[in-house]
Structure formats: C-alpha cells, structure tokens
Amino acid sequence: MTEPIFKIQNVVKRYGEHIILDNISFEIKKGEIFGIIGASGSGKTTLLQTIIGFLRPDHGDVLFRFEHLLDFQKAMTFRSVFKKQQAVKKIYGFASQTPSFYKDLTLRENLEYFGSLYNLSHDALQTNIDTLLNLMDLKHYENLLAKNLSGGMERRLDIACSLIHDPEVLVLDEPTADLDPILREHIWTLIKKINKKGTTIILASHHLTELENLCSRIAIIKDKAIVDVGSPDSIKNKYSKIQEVSIETYPGNYSKILSKISKGLIKSHEIKGAVLVMFTDKPQKVFHELFQILENLKEEVIDMKIGRPTLDDIFVSLSKDKKDEIYKNNQKKS
Ligand SMILES: Nc1ncnc2c1ncn2[C@@H]1O[C@H](COP(=O)(O)OP(=O)(O)OP(=O)(O)O)[C@@H](O)[C@H]1O
Ligand SMILES: [Mg+2]
C-alpha cells in the first residue's frame, strides 16, 4: 500500500474573489482509506469535487495513475483527471453529501438506473446489484420505494449507487453526517469491508476522533489549506506534548500579553469569551514568563489553568502562520 495513485498538486480554487483552496498538495496511496478532516465550510466538498475532476481548479492539477490501461508503460504514467474525464468517470464512485437517488424508485430500480449510466451488460448489472444489496444489508428492501427508507438505509443506498460500476476509488462526502452513533458505526464497518475488497477510499468528515481507527492517513484542512497529513498515530504523537494554558485577566489586553511572550513559545492561541487560551509544548516556561509580563502590564489575574487539549481542539486552534510551517516541515521529513 505504498504507491501513490493520486497526486494533488498545488491546487488553488477560487469562487469569485474568495480563495477556497489555497495551494493544496498531497498524495493518496492505492488501497488506503484516506480521510479529509475539517470544520464546516473549510473546503472539504470543494476539494473532493476537484479530486474527482468535477471542479476545475484555477491553478494546479490532480493527477491519477490509470492502472486499468493494459500497456504497462502507460499504466505507470500519471494523467490529469481533467484531461481524461470519460476514463475518470469509470474509476470513481462518488457519494455526495446529499442523497442522489430517486425517492420514487425502488432500491433495485435506483441501482438499475445508476448502473445504466455505465454501459454494463445486463448480466453484470444484475450481479452487481445483488452483491451490493447483500453487502449493504438492503436485500430485504429491494422493492421498497426509496422515499420510505430510514436515514441509515438512505446512506447505504447512496453508497451502493456509487459502487454500481465497481469503481477502483470510492469517494464519500460526509458518509455519517446526521446519523446516530450506532448507524455511524455500521457505515464505518461497511466502509472497511469495501476497502478490504481492494477499493481505495477517500472520505471527508468532521469527526476526527471517529476516523482515528478507520483511516490509514488523514489530511487536516483548515483556512483553505492542509495543516497536516499523516497516519492518525503519527499526528497524535506529534501533538501529544502540547498543553493548553488558559488565563483570564483584567483588563485583559491579550494581544499585548501575547506580544511579550518569547517568539515560538506559543504554537497557537485563541480567545474564548474572556479567556485567552494558548497552546504550547513548554507550559512551565510560559507560566514563568507570564507572571512577569502580567505584573509589568498591571494585569490582574482572575483565573489561570493548564490542561491537555483534545486533538479536535488542537486542530481547531492551529493558526495560519504555524500551519504553513508545520506542513513544510512534514514535507521535508516525508
Ligand atoms: N458554488 C459555490 N459558489 C461560491 N462559494 C462556494 C460554492 N461552493 C462552496 N462555496 C464556498 O466555499 C467554502 C467551502 O465550502 P465547502 O462546501 O467545500 O466546505 P465543506 O468543508 O464541505 O463544508 P461542510 O462541512 O459544511 O460540508 C464555503 O465558504 C462555501 O460557502
Ligand atoms: Mg461539505
């Protein structure tokens, strides 16, 4: 599972004046479950739609290795997904964030319809439909109108529709959004099953902690850019030393306080209501400096504490300046 199958290279996407994706680069390897994590509005859907060749970037490219080409030399060559739209359509299965199936068709009719878009023979289509209905635990409901499905079943039908042509790569945009924990677990189990059959999976989600046990690697997207890419373990280890130092002072001139702390000591910070939260791997040193700074600035301490942030908190708080640095360091290491 080491060869890259995709190279996302310096992708920039704008809508009007707004930059949505800012110079995004990373690779996805064959056979992996690759997770793209980010808060709402961070650009996950835009990135997925660019990867599948649906949205053309303003700059950069998405390259894909077309393994199905019989010619060995050609199969080793990366091609732009934007120049090979027809081939790309067969390679990808895409389940979008909102259901794509038709509510007034039955489950089997939906699968027949989506299969008809791919030139499959009648027999191959029927075999795929039966396999998918079984895989997704939907066999008993094949003649039910899709409008009568529960939320979890809807999601399974959507994934089944995107797998009807047996694609090499399955792309899932928030496959578990709005589902309860049990249904989410069911979807994750299914995704693992599909991946075991050899399908590369790319998915977007904002459930970072849930994806820890599912993904081989994750990319974290924040403020239009990738702040980190790596295995869940490597990311956890990297940030495990980081502590959260929170202070509340009066009058609370936090920008002044921050400007007096030694450069590089604070990885990132955020202001939560009246509290200044700073992330650091040297909390003792921060405390030491803070006492002096607060005295000099005549800031009265109301509250002061130290704690270990959750992974989610760290990612939410990563600042723009730091993220560029972290990502560049990662690129150097890998
Ligand atoms: N067609 C469009 N025209 C203009 N702006 C858009 C368009 N599509 C997306 N955007 C903007 O791009 C940004 C990223 O949107 P995107 O849907 O990719 O985020 P997301 O991470 O998938 O969010 P969510 O978690 O809510 O699905 C948002 O600010 C959104 O408003
Ligand atoms: Mg989205």
Image (cartoon, rainbow, N blue to C red):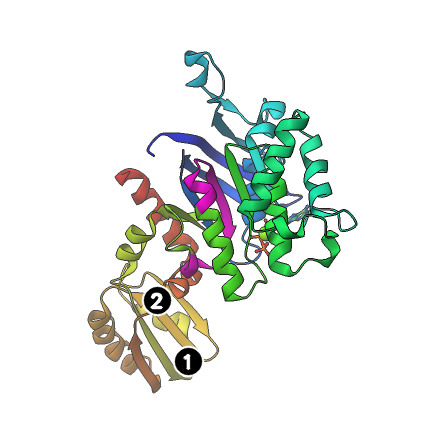
- Label whose residue precedes the other's in the sequence (1 or 2): 1
- The amino acid marked with disc number 2 is Ser
Q: Quadrant of residue 261?
A: bottom left
Neighbor class of circle 1 (other Cα within 10 Å; few <14, some 14-19, many 20+) is: many
Q: Nearer the viewer, residue 119 or 7?
A: 119
Say if residue 223 shows up in the picture: no
Say if residue 307 shows up in the picture: yes
Q: Residue 1: x, y in percent?
A: 34, 34
Q: Is residue 42 above or below residue 125?
A: below
- The amino acid marked with disc number 1 is Gly
Q: Nearer the viewer, residue 179 or 139?
A: 139
Label 2 near ligand 1 (CB < 8 Å): no
What span is in magenta? 193-210
Q: Which mark is residue 50?
A: none
Q: Is residue 233 above or below residue 64?
A: below
Q: Nearer the viewer, residue 2 or 145?
A: 145
* Magenta stretch encompasses residue 135: no
Residue at the (45%, 45%) spot, across then down: 193
Q: Residue 331: x, y in percent?
A: 32, 39
Quadrant into which the C terminus falls: top left
Q: For mark 1, what is the residue?
A: 252
Q: Secondary structure at mark 1?
A: loop
Residue at the (41%, 63%) spot, across then down: 312
Q: Residue 181: x, y in percent?
A: 50, 65
Q: Quadrant of residue 238?
A: bottom left
Q: Quadrant of residue 301?
A: bottom left
Q: For mark 2, what is the residue?
A: 259
